[in-house]
Amino acid sequence: MAKRVEPRGEDSFEAGRISTAFESLSQRNTKPRKVIAEKLKELAEERKSFTGDDLWREVRRKGSRIGRATVFRSIEQLVAMEVLDRIDFSDGSHRFFVCGDRHHHHHLACIHCHRVVEFEYCLPGAVITSIGRQERFSIEDHALTLFGRCEDCK
Amino acid sequence: MAKRVEPRGEDSFEAGRISTAFESLSQRNTKPRKVIAEKLKELAEERKSFTGDDLWREVRRKGSRIGRATVFRSIEQLVAMEVLDRIDFSDGSHRFFVCGDRHHHHHLACIHCHRVVEFEYCLPGAVITSIGRQERFSIEDHALTLFGRCEDCK
DNA sequence: ATGCATGCAAACCATTTGCATATCC
DNA sequence: GGATATGCAAATGGTTTGCATGCAT
C-alpha cells in the first residue's frame, strides 16, 4: 500500500487553517491541541480520512498522554467549525477528514484506502427545487458522495 | 403533528413484497416475522423511517414477546434484500425505511418527522465518469440524499 | 488566581453475539 | 425429528460524560 502523498499546494494547503481553527476555538493554546493539529495537517496532506479512534491512536503514538475524550471533543468542535467533515460509508461506518474547500462541494471516497477528495460539481438548482416542489418538501440541504477506488487501489 | 397517511397505491403498494421477502429468506414463516412484516407495512404506507429500537418497541407494543435481536436480525436481512434501505442524517443518526422502488433512485427526507420519499432523478452518467476520470478514481457507487421539511412539517 | 481544558474511568447507546430453548415443516 | 429461528442476557464498539486536577493566560 503505497502511501504516496499528494500535497495540495506548495506549502501544505491547510498549514494555517487548522491551528487557526483551534485558536479561534478559545484563547487556550494547549499542548494536546497542538499535537492534534499537527497530526491533522499530516492527514490532510495525505487526504486520509480517519475514525475518532484512529486519530486518538495516532496521536497517542506520538508520545502524548492525551485522552480519548480530548480527541473526540476536538473532533466535535472542528466538525462544527467545518474544518473537519464527516463521511458516511454504505456499510454504516463513518470517518472524518480535513476538509480543504471553504465553498460548497461534495466528496469522492476510496472504499479501500479511505482517501477522500473534493469535487466542485453540484446538482443544478433547478433540479433540487423541482424535486422539492413535486414532493411538497422545502429542501434545506443535500448530501452527495461518490464511492470508488483511487488510482493506487484500483 | 398530523400523521396523515399517504398510501402509495390503491392496495398498499408493498402489501405483498415484505411478506414475500420474508418467505424467500427461508422456509420458515414464524410468528415474529409475521408481526414485523405487518408493522413494516404500516410504516411503509406512512413512509415513516425508524431506528432499530423504534421498530422493536412498536412491535413489542403489539403484544408479542419478541426480542430485540430478532428485530435487528430481520432488519439486517431485509436491508441485504433491499426491501429496507438506510438513510444517514447529518447529525450522525441513521434510520431505516421500507424502500418501495425496485430501480435506482435516491431519497428525500424530512428532518423533522423523518418521512422519506423516493425520487427518480440521478446524476448524469457523464458527470460521474468525468469526475472519476479527473480524480483518477473508478467510481463504483454513489449516494444522494436531499433533506428538508415535508408539507406537514414546514 | 481563575477558569477553561484535560485525563481517566465509568456510563452510555445502539447493536451484536452466544447459547439453550421453542418452533416450524 | 431435525434444523432453523427465537429470546434472553451478556458482550461489544464507539462515543460521551462526570469529575478532580492541570495548565495557560
Image: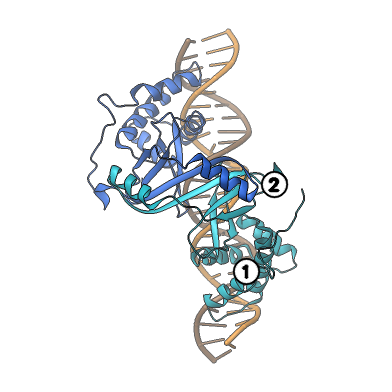
Chain colours: A cyan, B blue, C brown, D orange
In the rendered structure, which amino acid carries the disc numbered 2?
Answer: Glu
- The residue located at (58%, 75%) in the rendering is A20
From this viewpoint, is residue A93 visible? no
Q: Position of residue B35 (x, y in %)?
A: 37, 27
**Pointer 1 indicates a residue of which chain?**
A
Q: Is residue B124 above or below residue B34?
A: below
The residue sitting at the right extreme is A2
Q: Secondary structure at mark 2?
A: helix
Q: Which residue is mark 1?
A: A14
* Chain assignment, label 2: A
Quadrant of the image occupied by residue A68: bottom right
Task: Give the residue pinned by disc 2.
Answer: A151
Tell me the crowding category of disc 2: few under 14, some 14 to 19, or many 20 or more residues within 10 angstroms, Cα based: few
Towards the viewer: B16 or A114: A114
Q: Is residue A77 above or below residue B107?
A: below
Residue B71 placement, left or right of B129: left
Query: Residue A12 appears in which quarter of the rendering?
Result: bottom right
| Left or right side of A124 for A145 | right
x 68%, y 62%: residue: A45
Q: Residue at x 57, y 77 (%)?
A: A23
- Asked if disc 1 and disc 2 are in contact, CB closer than 8 Å, the reply is no
